[in-house]
Amino acid sequence: MRRRVVLLGALALTLTVSACGGLSQSTPGRTAHQKLADGRTFTQAIASDPGSLDPQMTVLSVAIQTDRYLYDSLLNVDAVGKPVTGLADKWRATTTKATFSLRRGITCADGSPLTATDVAANINFVGDPANKSPFAGVTIAPGTKATGDNASRTVTLTSGAPDAFLLRNAGRLPMVCAAGLRDRSLLAKGGAGTGMFTVTEAVPNDHYTLTRRKDYTWGPGAWKTNQPGLPDKVVVRVVPNATTSANLLLSGGLNAAATVGPDKKRLSAQKLFHADYLAPMGELFFNEAPGRAGRDERVRRALVQALDLTQLGKVLTSGTGTPATGMVTAEPRACTGDTVKGNLPAHDLAAARTALDAAGWRVGPSGVRVKDGKRLALTMIYATQLGPTTAPTAELAQQTWKSIGVDVKLKGVDSSGLNQALFTTGAWDVSMAPFGFELPSQAVRFVSGKAPPQGTNFAHVENAGYDSQVRRAAGLVGDDSCRAWVAAETSLIKRVDVVPYVHSVVPFFGTGARFEVSAGSITPSSIRMYG
């Protein structure tokens, strides 16, 4: 049976910033005729250690998945994109103002009540540029101000800039409790939560044990706390190797793991339950900082023209991918339209060589191109946690570029290493790490504005056409807004600022449990244990 469910978090598998929406298709598998079981422990694999669990200071997908167990948001979204209850049970919004009324009886992990002023303080923290939250400008516009009325349980915010998706963006910000607002070191360890579980044991790079809160009554929509099959505990295990995760699933050492690469076929053959979602898998960014070769559009265009993106996508997804249609994959999509088709340079090695010649990069005695005494030497980073197909995909690109006179050094990095390279050191020229977004507005801060360390425009993109369409789109709603957002993203792709080339259907396989998947992570309230 095919079904669509709400998504939180996206990434894409590597860096995630989306808030909700996403495609999920569930296959019953071995649980089809089993009975629900209480008192069980649900064990899930993640590909690398999440590091800090502060939900307002990370965009790493492994951290976002773990945080989903610990922190709730004001709203959830149903299968057709309609807001449903979360911490709030009433709401209204325009492009500049929003009001939320909190549900009664919400408490924090330490037993203290969650108040309207606490919620307002969450929004104000992210909206204050001095705090450097990666969600500022992504879900909450810088300069956004919120106030809370504890007597009426009402939170009112005024956006720092017009936002066509203000309700969904503000409504999906993970909320922390007052203790965490006072001492964010508690949040780094997963404390001061508003969610369904609390951290009871943390062993970095090995596992995190979470215990279900018996007082939790504010799940999505009409969720009830006395449902059979809810797990009493969750263990999030750090398992970097995809084949190891697959083996643990088959042996009963895991209840759930996202699987990419060749292990998908092996697990599918065992007819395990799985919930699937569509994710951006193949995506290239070029470092356009001053002094980098990628700053020249002619170089970016030639490098892309040299690649057979279709073949690259087949290697990356083991032949199971679909052509990319844009930067947003989470369903139901707020705006439709294919921004990729016809907007990237066609594969042509000869034309790529000619273009590099015209850009002043001439083949030197060693076979590597040189300009003004500088070799065309690039460092390409790829995300190891995306699975075993990423290295051969990177090697294929390396070999292709070598054939046109480009020296390419490959560097595999895990989640924290990727975060460090993109947002701190800037020591890269080409990135294979995909970004996933639930709304087109959430990409803005990553592809425009200030570069690190002042901002999050990690590739140093300067695209006037994109910026112009974004300004136009922000104050519009409905189809008018979407036309502008599609035009904005098209500007990025035509200028080769971002190169989406393949999407992947990523299954979360499960054994002894069923669940729903939302934008790259399991929805905690959906987990049911079987035995």
Image: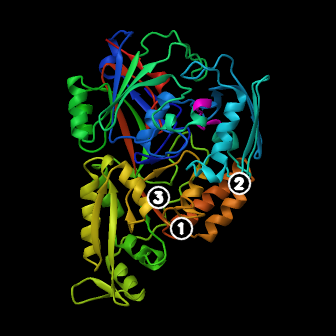
Cβ–Cβ below 8 Å for labels 1 and 3?
A: no
Q: CA distance from mark 1 to mark 3?
A: 14 Å
Cβ–Cβ below 8 Å for labels 1 and 2?
A: no
Amino acid on which the number 3 mark rests in the picture: Phe
Residue 457 visible? The answer is yes
Whether the magenta-drawn stretch holds residue 326 is answered as no
How crowded is the residue under tag 2: few (<14 C-alpha within 10 Å), some, or many (20+)? many
Q: Which residues are magenta?
A: 171-179
Whether the magenta-drawn stretch holds residue 174 is answered as yes
Q: Which residue is mark 3?
A: 423
Q: CA distance from mark 1 to mark 2?
A: 19 Å
Amino acid on which the number 1 mark rests in the picture: Val
Picture residue at 36% right of the left edge, 9% below the top: 35
In the picture shown, does residue 346 fall above or below 112?
below
Considering depth in this image, is 88 or 319 the residue closer to the camera? 88
Q: Secondary structure at mark 2?
A: helix
Amino acid on which the number 2 mark rests in the picture: Ala
Mark closer to the chain start, 1 or 2: 1
Cβ–Cβ below 8 Å for labels 2 and 3?
A: no
Quadrant of the image containing the C terminus: top left
Residue 292 image offset from top left, x and y in percent: 43, 76
Choose top left, top right, bottom left or bottom right for residue 158. top right
Secondary structure character of the magenta stretch overall: loop
Q: Which residue is mark 1?
A: 461
Q: Nearer the viewer, mark 2 or mark 3?
A: 3
